[in-house]
Image (spheres, rainbow, N blue to C red):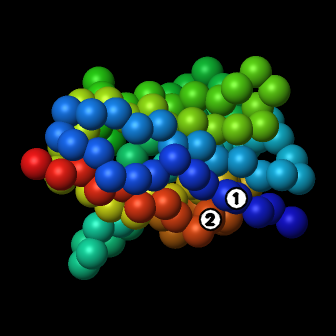
């Protein structure tokens, strides 16, 4: 059973940085795609970043490209989202997700497992 636990959210001023972590205590993230999504009040959940199952492909939403980095540790036990140059419009609940496939896709409905989410708030 997949159980994703996110951590690292919080309150930060614009221009600051945060690092989110996602871990599944019972497994590694080998050979499966891992993604980060976010949802602000009202709008639909949107794709932020993804890492392919091979570990060689990284994908980003245009709104975060150049500011966010998705990565795993060497053991592939933890997935990170390093967020820099944060903006107030980055404020949202951030979710970690896993697919039963190695390819990253951007539609939330195509992801099979979700964490509980962690709040990120960026003040002006």
Query: In the rendered image, which quarter is residue 85 located in?
Result: top left
CA gap, disc 2 to disc 1? 6 Å
- The residue sitting at 71% across, 48% down in the picture is 23
Q: Is residue 50 visible?
A: no
In the depicted view, which residue is nearer to us: 39 or 83? Answer: 83
Note whether residue 23 is visible: yes
Residue at numbered disc 2 = 114
Q: Residue at x 27, y 75 (%)?
A: 41
Q: Residues within 10 Å of mark 1 (few under 14, many from 20)?
A: many
Residue 59 vs 119, above or below: the answer is above
100 versus 68 height, above or below: below
Q: Which x, y percent locates residue 114? A: 62, 65
Q: x, y percentage for residue 99?
A: 67, 54
Q: Residue at x 76, y 32 (%)?
A: 76
State left or right for residue 108 relative to residue 67: right
Q: What element carries label 2?
A: strand
Residue in the image at 82% along x and 41% along y = 28
**Residue underneath mark 1:** 4
Q: Is mark 1 on a helix, strand or loop?
A: loop
Q: Decide which of 74, 9 is in the foreground and name it.
A: 9
For the N terminus, the quadrant is bottom right
């Amino acid at each position: 059973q997949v159980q994703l636990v996110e951590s690292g959210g919080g309150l930060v001023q614009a221009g600051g940085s945060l690092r989110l972590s996602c871990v599944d205590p019972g497994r590694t993230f080998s050979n499966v795609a891992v993604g980060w999504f976010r949802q602000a009040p009202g709008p639909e959940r949107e794709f932020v970043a993804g890492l392919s199952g091979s570990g060689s492909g990284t994908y980003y939403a245009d709104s975060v490209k150049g500011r966010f980095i998705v990565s795993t540790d060497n053991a592939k036990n933890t997935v990170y989202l390093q967020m820099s140059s944060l903006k107030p419009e980055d404020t949202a609940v951030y979710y970690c997700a896993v697919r039963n496939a190695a390819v990253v896709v951007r539609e939330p409905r195509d992801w099979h497992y979700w964490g509980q989410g962690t709040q990120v708030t960026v003040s002006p």
